Amino acid sequence: MHGWTGKILRIDLTKRRVDVETPDERVYHDFVGGKGMAGYYLADHVTRSWNDPEMPLIFFTGPLVGTSSPTSGRMAVMSRSPLTGTVADASVGGKFGTELKKAGWDGVILTGRAETLTGIEMEDDQIRLVDASSLGGESISSMDQRFAGQAGSYAAIGPAAENGVKFANILFDGHYAAGRNGLGLVCAAKNLKYIKIRGSGKIPIHDPKGLEAARIDIFRLVAASPVLMGEFGISKYGTGALYDLTASRRMMPTDNFRKTFFEAASGLNAHAYEKKYHPGHTGCRGCHIRCKKISGDKEVLPEFETMNHFTALLGLKDISLVMKANGLCNDLGMDTISAGAVLSCYSEIEGRALLPDEILSLLQDMGHGRGPGKELGKGAFRYASSVGHPESAMTVKKLELPAYDPRGAYGMALGYALSTRGGCHLRAYPIATELLRKPVPMDRFTFSGKARMVKIAEDVNAMVDSLTACKFIFLGATLEEYARAFSAVTGQEASGQDLLKIGERIYFQERMMNSRNGFDCKDDDLPERFFKEPGTGSPQMDIPPIPRGKFVEARLNYYQIRGLDANGMPLQAKAEALNLPWKT
């Protein structure tokens, strides 16, 4: 076997038992790796509660990890979400996935609950479960100091997970997050504080010359992409390069999505951070785009979503506050998008703007489960509902929305509503087509053609997260180039269309898993605000409310294309056509 190690590590934390599984090659063929393989192993358990000891927490690499394929340093983490109840998965960068693969494992499946707070230490095939009782309540920065200078990689949870925050993250090497859906809380429910890993093996490659040829093609396409490598691109400025884009298109979420334009935005963009903090370029293993920005003082600069949610969304104009909030969320181990969105919801309900010191205090309260932070840590939907104002929660399936106002891009509106993990921009990332005009431009103020576009993009991204590569590089390259890299690494011949079909299987399986937990068309919807209130227009541009009738029509078109019934439930015939076992 090439590309894969052919081995999965199973750890039962209750029994303190370690087992090795050798999957059938058919499973690799049908699900590839990453989120595809993780979903395959989650499917039999997805109706369990997220905190059931037998609910697995799954870490999976893809076949390209550990090779010279571009952006191959990623991995997938998956379970069921404490925040949404949906499938929960995250694509994580850094070097943990590479170390896991070099240690000889395609994935790790954790079940059970340790009797006391525990750490897992792995070096190749040597696995130790160690007492971590003394580390209870330790921050991520404290864990980072503990492992500083040691070879390998680590994953850890912070106080937020231990104190029940439903959007707690797992942090890798201090600042790469498995975020959004509360995977940190799942980890805490297993009484697991950290995993430390070091690998020394090499990944066998079927055709090194073929891989090198594919690499050259991918590098050429990336170099030609202004979005990635241009003067104002993601390589230079990180994801913050997108801040000016949403502002100029009048789709910047402002004042808890009551407005779509923030007048102070031009002084709060990525250039402002570059000028003040002079960040260096850092990247995940195997990535030459290097979008992670870290200052000379080792402060991690915020991603685009965090920049928006701690400025425009809260009506604030201080980038030093954004830096502090970003650092604090990372240190506590909680999601910055959800944290900012929860605070903006709280601000609206309170009827007043929050002051910078109050924001930092509330973040501390959230992470430590005290005072008003205890309720806010349950997420915007639960908090707003508990105080009688559910209309103030800007969520889909209880997941707080990120930094693209859907009134300014109807494909994004559809993508948010249909996402299998709730209000997520990355399941389909329609912005690529509607704003960045890749692979083809589309009118952002129409639903025409958007159902098919969203469906195809979901399938592509499901495959990207299974290979496991970075979505950003697909603003330059395509599945055709990556199919050649995949074939060269594994020896399994595949075209871009072959990979797309596997992506369809992987995504449909997620719809099946959610349907078994009761999710249907009533959940594939947006907050009413977007259908009733206009955005902030300009003399050149109106931002009207989203037409609900057209939205519902596009959603129904999507259901037909995806192989779902009119209620959004999977059809047995489609499952069988995709070689998926039918489960109800």
Image (cartoon, rainbow, N blue to C red):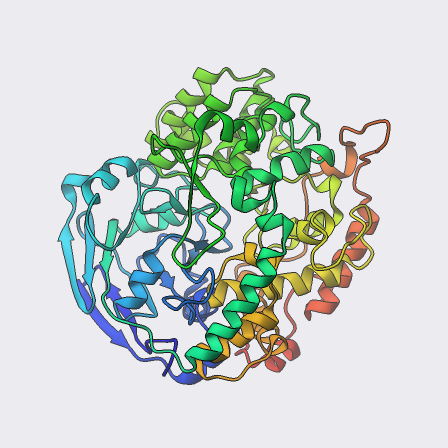
Q: Quadrant of the N terminus?
A: bottom left
Front residue (pair 403, 415) = 403
Q: Residue at x 45, y 71 (%)?
A: 40
Q: Is residue 277 above or below residue 565?
A: above
Image coords of residue 34 (percent x, y): 44, 65
Q: Residue at x 60, y 21 (%)?
A: 315
Q: Is residue 539 above or below residue 60?
A: above
Front residue (pair 408, 346) = 408
Q: Quadrant of the C terminus?
A: bottom right
Q: Quadrant of residue 529?
A: top right
Compared across the picture, whether 442 is left or right of 9 comes to right
Image coords of residue 455 (percent x, y): 68, 63
Q: Residue at x 57, y 73 (%)?
A: 505
Front residue (pair 404, 241) = 241
User: So how many labels did they put on this image?
Assistant: 0
Q: Residue at x 59, y 79 (%)?
A: 495
Compared across the picture, whether 198 is left or right of 412 comes to left
Q: Is residue 305 above or below residue 297?
A: below
Observer able to see residue 124: yes
Image coords of residue 154 (percent x, y): 27, 51
Image coords of residue 220 (percent x, y): 58, 62
Compared across the picture, whether 334 is left or right of 221 comes to left
Residue sitting farthest toward the right:
539
Observer able to see residue 524: no
Q: Quadrant of residue 511?
A: bottom right
